[in-house]
Image: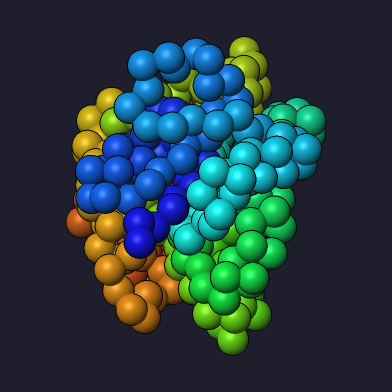
Amino acid sequence: MNKVVLVTGGSSGIGKSISIYLKSKGYTVYGTSRNPNRYPDSPINLVAMDVKDPISIKEAVVEIIDKESKIDILINNAGVGITGPVEETPIEEIHGAMDTNFYGPLRVLQAVLPYMRKQQSGRVINITSIAGYMGLPYRGIYSASKGALEIVTEAYRMECAHLNIHFSNVAPGDFATNIAAGRFHAPVIEGSDYAIGYSKTLKLIDEHVDDGSDPMEVAYKIYDILQEKNPGIHYKVGSFLQKFSIVLKKILPEKRYEKMLKKHYKL
């Protein structure tokens, strides 16, 4: 029988690439969008969902269950970017980023897991970020939101193992998507002690996205993980240097690693 997949944030970027590729491999795929009507030519089925709205999540999940009677795989991909000096980032924007990037996946899981328990099977892949492995300057809130999702997945994995529900994380590096367009940028405040460093970092971040790899690389990795009978916990997808930065954090003295990051961001 075809596996039924739910991909949050499936209308663009990495989520769209995942959805299209899994559909090409024979999966029945449902992506989500806050406004599916904006994508009349979408190559995949889109259902309305806002991961910040529990009612819309429940309605979307019920819609899929009514049509397919099951959800075999959940890929929590919906997320938002946020940049700025932590001190100067409005608290309401911090709440918004955490609401989407961390609480959002938890809400979707609370809606989907009861059906997976009933099925006595399920796969969950949470899309995090290589940025979640380290506190990056002027991306601290984004790093924190993705790092939190990495950690909570470890807990879910142990709690749900006896239910035959398998959890994994996939942490992408920089990929060529439209994330920059929807990212919240705290304004560069003229005369601020952070203005020079933040301006440099913003430029570097945008260059990384513009020069990023094809998001289909993430889709290929997701497919490979789904073929594994006993999937691992943490997977990384990105350039060699991006993935190696995680290794370096483990083996280098803390201050030396911090110095390396500051040099990279020209701080």
Give how far across and how far down residue 218 sits, in percent: 29, 49
Q: Is residue 154 visible?
A: no
Give how far across and how far down residue 177 sits, in percent: 35, 29
Q: How many marks?
A: 0
Which quarter of the image is occupied by the C terminus?
top left
60 over 36 or under it: above or below: below
Give how far across and how far down residue 226 sits, in percent: 33, 65
Which quarter of the image is occupied by the N terminus?
bottom left
24 horizontally vs 80: left or right = left
Please tell me which residue lies in front, 81 or 155: 155
88 horizontally vs 74: left or right = right
256 horizontally vs 61: left or right = left
190 horizontally vs 96: left or right = left
Question: What residue is at 62 percent from the left and 40 percent from the top?
Answer: 63
Question: What residue is at 57 percent from the left and 76 percent from the top?
Answer: 120
Please tell me which residue lies in front, 65 or 101: 65
Please tell me which residue lies in front, 115 or 131: 115
Please tell me which residue lies in front, 14 or 91: 14
Q: Is residue 79 visible?
A: yes
241 over 188 or under it: above or below: below
The colour style of the image is rainbow
Give how far across and how far down residue 220 sits, in percent: 23, 52
The image quarter in which residue 189 lies: top right
249 over 75 or under it: above or below: below
Question: What residue is at 46 percent from the left and 40 percent from the top?
Answer: 30
Question: What residue is at 37 percent from the left and 32 percent from the top?
Answer: 44
